[in-house]
Amino acid sequence: MNLFPLKVRGAQTARRGKVLVGPVDLDLRGAGVTVVMGPNGSGKTTLLRLLHGAARLTGGRIDWACGEQEARSRQGFVFQRPVMLRRTVLDNLMYPLRMRGTAKADAQEQAQEWAGRVGLDKMLGRMAPNLSGGEQQKLALARAMITQPQVLFMDEPTAALDGRATREVEAVIRAARASGTQLIVSTHDMGQARRLADEVLFLLHGQVTEHSPARAFFDAPGSMQARAFLRGDIVE
Amino acid sequence: MGEIWAGLSEAFRLLVTLDGDLVQITLRSLQVTLTALIIASAIALPLAALLAVRRFRFRRGVIAVLNALMGLPPVVVGLVVYVMLSRSGPFGVLGLLFTPTAMIIAQVIIIVPLIASIAHQSLRDLWSEYHDLLISMNVTQAQKIRTLLWDARRALLTAALAGFGRGIGEVGAIMIVGGNIDNATRVLTTAIALETGRGDFALALGLGIVLIVLAITVNLAIHWLSRTEQEGRW
């Protein structure tokens, strides 16, 4: 069953009376890679968490085509700072499968296969928290992908990585898209957005001010703030 | 100074000759404390994990009470358990007073708050690290608890060892509920108290040294078995 279209109507999240994001109205149809852009503090991370169900919805509705519980089980999330379980690389990869009841031998086989895909097959026995930042992010990506989610949220996945690690992570993202996974990626790396995006959501002060195909957004942004952002001006 | 030397030589003699009484008392000490430790850990560790993971009303209050109970006076615990197990008490019919079982019950009550409090600190830190990941993976509450307990196992071992230290060195409660009966409920700490009362300081010191060696040996053995200091592991 497909998760899309995703219909968001007046969705918002607030903490201690302060609205962090919203109200947001959106229709996502699963365009491949949806890049969420906006200046620092605009609510990119919170929007991703809200759509994923990790932030509390304090108003409005978020409706996936297949229902909330089913949708949650078909999603993955990769954080800006990868969270590593205090286990080996192999055990980190096996973890989501084991939690879903996959047999140990089967989980181990899939984990080895995914480690190979992200270039970690020589490190299976190493403790995950001891890996470099780039290796950890690749592991986090593989761990999120191993359950074959239909939607993968990625919160600035290359923010703390160098050029080479960024290229490797982007290659995994492209492979995921090619295999049919829909990606919703936040970034304020303009180059990365241009390289990856099929469509763009532009966020400002917790509001989606623009939602358009990538080419249209980069060629002729609709709002003054988006134009300023693309020029590299400071947008507040 | 002379008594200390006499104590050391007495300890040496007891150990070398594998004195029958000493062996029996030592084994009973280990039996009581290790049994209490296993039971207390089975209660305290899941409780600590639950307090770390679950948000409920009065949670802070429960944690505060647990921390306060770390300082529970053993003598009072002994007294309460004595009253409960005495013939006129609600559990008198079980006939447990002045048995090792009564001593185990008292020790469990004393060390559960200690293990739970120390474990909770570690699990709370680990939960703040894992929170977003486990939420995003949509794992169940039971799976969260199992994950935390497994990944924090070495920190939890420290909590358990603190419990062992408190239990093996405890005298007040087990003296009251065990009665320090020869060949039945006498353990190292109650034997030390008895010999001190009798004025046989050399033997008391000897037993004290055996107790210290025992506590250190068990700690080292558990650390070694769980490889806590192995590089790159937790």
Image (cartoon, rainbow, N blue to C red):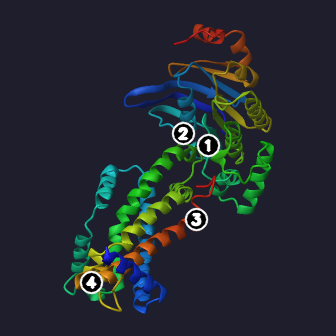
Image quadrant in which you'd find residue B176: bottom left
Question: Which residue position is annotated with label 1?
Answer: A71
Q: Which residue type carries mark 3? A: Ser
Give the Cα distance between marks 1 and 4.
68 Å
Give the Cα distance between marks 3 and 1.
41 Å
Residue at disc 4, secondary structure: helix
Dot 1: few (<14), some (14–19), or many (≥20) neighbours within 10 Å? many
Q: Chain of mark 1?
A: A
Residue A120 in the image: state x and y as whole percent.
Answer: 76, 45
Q: Which residue type carries mark 1? A: Ala
Residue at disc 3, secondary structure: helix
Question: Which residue position is annotated with label 4?
Answer: B194
Residue at disc 1, secondary structure: helix
Number of marks = 4
B103 left or right, relative to A121? left
B215 left or right, relative to A176? left
Question: Which residue position is annotated with label 3?
Answer: B226
- Mark 2 vs mark 3: tell me if same chain: no
